[in-house]
Image: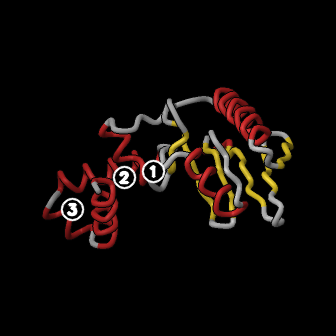
Amino acid sequence: MFIDNVLLLSRKLASNSAQYKQRFPQITAAVLKLTAAIDSTRIPANRFSAFISGETPMTDMNDSEFRELIEQKISQLEDRLEDADIDYDVSGSILTVEFDNGTQIIVSPQISGHELWLAATSGGFHYAWNGEDWISTRDEGTFDQKLIECCSSQGESYLEI
């Protein structure tokens, strides 16, 4: 909610900058400064308000730390898929889950944004590491929850993570 208000005000400032700068010079400067900070961070805008309020700390990691997390996650998924007798293939750090009905779920890292992506017939989903789990950049759902849901609905397969 906070971030939406900041971005809305920022858009109004951009379109009516002279009017707002005259009437609210301090607020205008603060909003423009905050908007620049939001733009410069790698944290998705819809997660920024949770980040600054301390609700969901987003980690600041380098590429090698990110790759290590991805390797751990892919390895965990391989174990769980084997246990569930679900077909899969791994190529590099991309995991492709294959179902009997011919559909697939693809799990892949997005290194530049330090996100884990999940592509399924129901859509594409992006996840950021918060220090404890892979959390959706759109809502509060986790990667594991969405993968379980997609395996169930798309492949009629039960996956336990």
User: Depth check: 10 or 92 in front?
Assistant: 92
Q: Position of residue 8 (x, y in %)?
A: 31, 65
Q: How many labels were placed on the picture?
A: 3
Spatial distance from mark 3 to mark 2, Cα to Cα?
15 Å
Question: At label 3, which amino acid type do we have?
Answer: Lys
Q: What element carries label 1?
A: helix
Percent x, y of residue 62: 62, 29
Which quadrant of the rendered structure holds the C terminus?
A: top right
Q: Quadrant of residue 27?
A: bottom left
Q: Nearer the viewer, residue 122 or 17?
A: 122
Q: CB under 8 Å between callouts 1 and 2?
A: yes
Callout 1, which amino acid? Asp
Q: Residues within 10 Å of mark 2 (few under 14, many from 20)?
A: some
Most distant residue in the left direction: 23
Quadrant of the drawing holding the N terminus:
bottom left
**For this rendering, which residue is in front, 149 or 11?**
149
Circle number at residue 141: none
Q: Which mark is residue 21?
A: 3
81 relative position to 41: left or right? right
Find disc 1 in the rendering and name its residue.
39
Q: Residue at x 36, y 52 (%)?
A: 35
| Dot placed on the residue nearer the N-terminal end, 3 or 2 | 3
The residue positioned 33% from the left and 54% from the top of the image is 3
In this picture, residue 122 sits left or right of residue 11:
right
CA distance separating discs 1 and 2:
6 Å
**Which residue corresponds to mark 2?**
35
Is the residue under label 3 in contact with that under label 1 (CB below 8 Å)? no
| Pointer 1 or 3: first along the chain | 3
| Separation of marks 1 and 3 at Cα, in angstroms | 21 Å
Residue drawn at the location 83% of the way across and 49% of the way down: 87
Amino acid on which the number 2 mark rests in the picture? Thr
